[in-house]
């Protein structure tokens, strides 16, 4: 199915207070520094488990309706399970026609608030809607995005011809495949340098649902890919979402299994006046995460601060609220077809 034909909202709005809006695999990346990695708010460079509190603003609408979804997205980001076929459409989901799944949208926005950005160009690039599925980049020295979808005719794939565009998408060096993960998540396995691409590849591949067909994995897409649709369930992470978070977890030395590595524990604390990431349902904007950044270690490592998620009022958007609480068992953490990531 053509993604553009069923688009309800062109974007989930992304706001960065402390600097100009920029996007990529991490929200702090830029043309000047595509290597920048953004960590969750409580990471300061020391290893171990970091806890990020997540709560609902007491002034929010729909508090009773959103509770299960808030618990579910917390579980999904905590377990970091890479999933194929994570886009469920029509009769494959429980969402009535014409409604937008609140939980899928919240999962995406929480990803922004722990440091991830869109892997595709998205609306912030200013390119036409038809071109927003190209892989995230800066527009290079010529100050123009160079966009050519190559022989396969699919935007965001490995044969895209991108001129001097500056890649901001971390790709898996061994195969440039965003739909698989291995056991190593650091800069020995992932890169933004196009010189590290496999022989024959021209640009970094992103995990768009149209690209997934090239890998025989239809209806698979990164949760952080921009776009919200009616009658669509995307409540599970794809491999690219997991890999990007786990790359950040390799710490400021960007080397896995060293003392600055961390794990993330997002703790949903319910309704609270303050927390690390606060959710409010109100207003006429569809969805966004607003926050600032603080330096962890210059020049390449920052962390999120003062993060807030806002999803639009039910008076303006026809939300579907999931009422099925997710329970994840240990044996369900890793899906068939993936190598199990290191604990």
Image (spheres, helix red, strand yellow):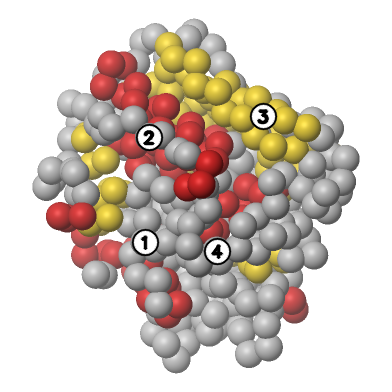
Q: Position of residue 87 (x, y in %)?
A: 33, 57
**Do tag 1 and tag 4 residues touch (Cβ < 8 Å)?**
no
Kindly report the distance in space between the C-alpha atoms of the residues bearing marks 1 and 4. 13 Å
Which badge, 1 or 3, is on the more N-terminal residue?
A: 3
**Label tally:** 4
Q: Position of residue 227 (x, y in %)?
A: 35, 53
- Residue under the image location 44 percent in, 91 percent down: 151
Residue under pointer 4 = 338
Q: Position of residue 259 (x, y in %)?
A: 88, 40
Pick whichever, 198 or 281, lies toward us: 198
Residue under pointer 1 = 85
Q: Neighbour class for label 2 at 10 Å: few (<14), some, many (≥20)?
A: some
Residue 41 got which mark? 3
In the displayed orientation, state which residue is furthest to the front: 331
Residue under pointer 2 = 326
Please state which of the two labelled residues, at mark 1 or mark 2, is closer to the viewer: 2
Please state which of the two labelled residues, at mark 2 or mark 3, is closer to the viewer: 2
**Do tag 2 and tag 3 residues touch (Cβ < 8 Å)?**
no
**Quadrant in the picture for residue 162:** bottom right
Q: Neighbour class for label 3 at 10 Å: few (<14), some, many (≥20)?
A: many
Kindly report the distance in space between the C-alpha atoms of the residues bearing marks 3 and 4. 29 Å
Which badge, 4 or 2, is on the more N-terminal residue?
A: 2
Image position of 80 with respect to 267: above or below: below
In the displayed orientation, state which residue is furthest to the left: 97
Left/right placement of residue 226 relative to residue 202 reads left
Kindly report the distance in space between the C-alpha atoms of the residues bearing marks 2 and 3. 25 Å
Which badge, 1 or 2, is on the more N-terminal residue?
A: 1
């Amino acid at each position: 199915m053509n993604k553009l034909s069923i688009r309800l909202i062109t974007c989930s709005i992304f706001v960065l207070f402390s600097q100009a809006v920029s996007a990529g695999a991490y929200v702090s990346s830029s043309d000047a520094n595509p290597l920048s990695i953004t960590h969750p708010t409580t990471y300061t460079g020391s290893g171990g488990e970091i806890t990020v509190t997540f709560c609902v603003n007491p002034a929010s609408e729909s508090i009773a309706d959103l509770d299960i979804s808030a618990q579910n997205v917390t579980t999904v980001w905590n377990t970091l399970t890479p999933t194929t076929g994570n886009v469920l459409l029509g009769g494959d989901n429980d969402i009535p026609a014409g409604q937008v799944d609140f939980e899928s949208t919240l999962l995406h926005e929480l990803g922004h608030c722990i440091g991830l950005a869109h892997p595709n160009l998205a609306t912030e690039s200013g390119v036409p809607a038809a071109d927003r599925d190209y892989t995230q980049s800066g527009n290079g020295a010529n100050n123009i995005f160079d966009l050519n979808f190559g022989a396969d005719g699919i935007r965001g794939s490995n044969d895209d011809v991108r001129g001097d565009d500056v890649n901001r998408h971390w790709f898996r060096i061994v195969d440039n495949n965003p739909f698989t993960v291995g056991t190593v998540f650091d800069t020995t396995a992932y890169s933004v340098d196009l010189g590290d691409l496999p022989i024959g590849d021209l640009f970094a591949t992103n995990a768009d649902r149209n690209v997934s067909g090239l890998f025989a994995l239809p209806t698979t897409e990164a949760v952080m890919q921009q776009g919200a649709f009616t009658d669509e369930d995307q409540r599970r992470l794809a491999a690219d979402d997991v890999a990007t978070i786990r790359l950040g977890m390799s710490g400021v030395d960007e080397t896995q299994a060293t003392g600055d590595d961390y794990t993330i524990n997002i703790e949903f604390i319910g309704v609270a006046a303050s927390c690390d990431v606060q959710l409010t349902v109100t207003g006429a904007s569809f969805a966004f995460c607003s926050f600032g950044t603080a330096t962890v270690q210059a020049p390449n490592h920052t962390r999120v601060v003062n993060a807030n998620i806002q999803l639009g009022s039910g008076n303006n958007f026809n939300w579907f609220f999931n009422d099925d609480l997710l329970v994840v068992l240990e044996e369900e953490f890793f899906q068939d077809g993936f190598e199990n990531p290191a604990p």
